[in-house]
Amino acid sequence: MNAYENQGAGPSPESTELQQAKKVTMAVYALQAASFVFGVTLIAAVILNYIKKEDVRGTWLDSHFRWQIRTFWFGLLWGVIGGVTILIGVGFFILGVTTIWFIYRIVKGWLRLSEGKEMYLNN
């Protein structure tokens, strides 16, 4: 039997479930990134986070879900603040900084996911 032949009943359900959860996590990052072109995908991303949240509880992917959810809510908060203050001029600055911060969060999360690492939760 060579190294590629299956010696058991297949992969354990946990590893298959974890692989599936990793794909969902990657899809959420992709939806967040796509929101720069199609804004509605950001809503789809956070809904997917909340629907699948229990599936990743207690795994290293849980930190990514918290990262993604926080990215959505803080991005929304600062987006609204920027939109409201646009009339006094400071809103353009707030929206610009929020956009850069949002891109940073997507890129950092996606890179750490591809490396199989948890997110830093204090960022």
Image (cartoon, rainbow, N blue to C red):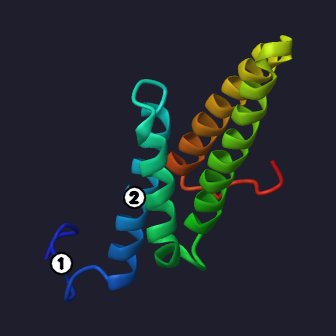
Residue shown at the point (76%, 27%) measured from the top left:
84
So how many labels did they put on this image?
Answer: 2
Residue shown at the point (48%, 42%) measured from the top left:
42
> In this rendering, would 55 be left or right of 68?
left
Task: Label 2: state its secondary structure.
Answer: helix
Q: Earlier in the sequence, mark 1 or mark 2?
A: 1
- Amino acid carrying label 1: it is Asn
* Residues tagged 1 and 2 counted as in contact (Cβ below 8 A): no
Residue 37 horizontal/vertical position (percent): 42, 24
Residue shown at the point (51%, 78%) measured from the top left:
54
28 up-or-down from 59: above or below:
above
61 up-or-down from 88: above or below:
below
- Amino acid carrying label 2: it is Val
- Within 10 Å of the Cα at label 1, are there few (<14), some (14-19), or many (20+) other Cα atoms? few
Residue 85 horizontal/vertical position (percent): 81, 23
> In this rendering, would 14 be left or right of 90?
left
Q: Which residue is mark 2?
A: 24
| C-alpha span from label 1 to label 2 | 26 Å
Q: Quadrant of the N terminus?
A: bottom left
Residue 60 horizontal/vertical position (percent): 60, 68
91 up-or-down from 69: above or below:
above
Task: Label 1: state its secondary structure.
Answer: loop
Q: Which mark is residue 6?
A: 1
As drawn, which residue projects farthest toward the bottom?
Answer: 9
Residue shown at the point (39%, 58%) measured from the top left:
24
> In this rendering, would 23 be left or right of 96?
left
